[in-house]
Image: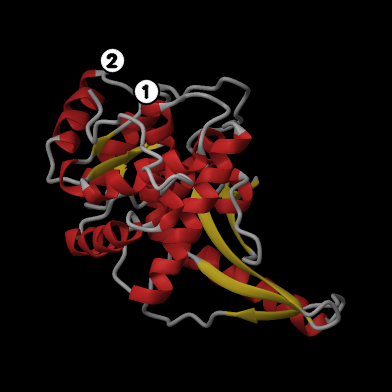
């Protein structure tokens, strides 16, 4: 099973940026631990197959495959497909994964045993958040079904993030954290399919300013009904802020651990909030939605 993840899978791709995540679910892998231990050999095999394609020259494209060091245990294989004829290129990240969820149907909710296994194996390996590719379909569905205007707001926030990245460089928080923060702002403050984009954008930037209070999670795919999951969630939510739990993977705090990166982004947000795009024609502020930085 191969699943398209990332922005292209969620329907939030920015114009002019061509990249795709391809998650390859392998029947050979029977656990999260086995994925961690054996992913390197599968990545090496995929790389060999791509290089064989390149030699055959049956495609009107050029591959540029990232070289792997022998001692590495790579999580991802990156390559570029380039078409000289069309003068276009697409960057791909290929991630081998354990098929923890099996076949998904509409309205699917994972069995709590999947998350119990995930929590136990992550804690044994000390690799929390390492196995998020296994839940790509849930991440994709969490965003894909959202209203068109909310997706447009997500793209605007991502565009702002990219501008900050170009101006400030690293470190910055993960982009996925900003996507989830945008969904949270809309869910808590609006929930309408038609809204003033500037108000939504301002709300997200104001939440970035409050990064030291952020504690956000969703119960769409997992909740505290199972005692092992409940105990784990309690510990996760008690960690230092910011906390933004991946709605598909409770072991993943997508806010990251580097508060300096949030501080840097917050400084940029503070400057941007003075820009004319947050003012009405008469000079009064457009305002923002009433959203708490913490899920109650």
Residue at left 43%, top 22%?
Answer: 111
The answer to whether residue 208 is above or below residue 162 is: above
Q: CA distance from mark 2 to mark 1?
A: 9 Å
Q: Counting other residues with Cα less than 10 Å from the Cα at mark 2, is it few (<14), some (14-19), or many (20 or more)? A: few
Quick check: marks 2 and 1 in contact, CB under 8 Å? yes
Question: Could you tell me residue 63's position as x and y percent?
Answer: 70, 79
Question: Could you tell me residue 1's position as x and y percent?
Answer: 65, 45
Instruction: Classify residue 264 by image quadrant.
Output: bottom left
User: Which residue is outermost to the front?
Assistant: 282
The answer to whether residue 150 is above or below residue 91 is: above
Question: Could you tell me residue 65's position as x and y percent?
Answer: 61, 79
Q: Nearer the viewer, residue 255 or 23?
A: 255
Q: Identify the residue under disc 1.
A: 112
If the image is split into quadrants, where does the C terminus sit?
top left
In-image side of 240 versus 26 (left or right) = left
Q: Is residue 59 visible?
A: yes
Instruction: Between label 2 and label 1, give the one nearer the viewer.
Output: 2
Q: Total of numbered circles in the picture?
A: 2
Q: Identify the residue under disc 2.
A: 225
The answer to whether residue 50 is above or below residue 5 is: below
Q: Nearer the viewer, residue 200 or 275?
A: 275
SS under mark 1 = helix
Residue at left 87%, top 77%?
Answer: 58
Q: Is residue 169 visible?
A: no
């Amino acid at each position: 099973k191969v699943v398209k993840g990332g922005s292209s899978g969620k329907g939030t791709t920015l114009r002019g940026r061509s990249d795709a995540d391809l998650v390859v679910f392998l029947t050979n892998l029977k656990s999260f631990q086995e994925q961690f231990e054996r992913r390197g050999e599968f990545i090496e095999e995929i790389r060999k197959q791509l290089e064989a394609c390149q030699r055959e020259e049956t495609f009107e494209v050029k591959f540029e495959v990232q070289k792997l060091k022998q001692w590495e245990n790579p999580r991802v294989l990156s390559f570029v497909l380039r078409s000289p004829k069309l003068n276009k290129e697409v960057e791909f990240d290929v991630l081998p994964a354990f098929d923890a969820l099996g076949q998904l149907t509409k309205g699917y909710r994972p069995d709590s045993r999947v998350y119990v296994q995930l929590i136990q194996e992550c804690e044994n390996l000390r690799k929390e958040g390492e196995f998020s590719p296994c839940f790509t379909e849930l991440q994709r569905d969490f965003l894909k079904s959202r209203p068109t205007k909310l997706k447009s707001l997500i793209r605007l926030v991502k565009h702002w993030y990219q501008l900050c990245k170009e101006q400030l460089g690293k470190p910055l928080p993960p982009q996925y954290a900003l996507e989830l923060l945008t969904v949270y702002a809309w869910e808590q403050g609006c929930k309408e399919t038609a809204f003033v984009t500037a108000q939504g954008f301002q709300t997200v930037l104001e939440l970035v300013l409050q990064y030291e209070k952020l504690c956000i999670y969703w119960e769409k795919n997992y909740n505290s009904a199972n005692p092992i999951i409940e105990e784990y969630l309690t510990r996760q939510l008690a960690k230092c802020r910011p906390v933004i739990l991946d709605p598909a993977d409770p072991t993943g705090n997508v806010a990251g651990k580097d508060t300096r990166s949030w501080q840097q982004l917050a400084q940029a947000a503070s400057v941007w909030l003075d820009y004319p795009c947050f003012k009405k024609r008469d000079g009064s502020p457009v305002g923002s939605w009433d959203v708490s930085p913490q899920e109650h």
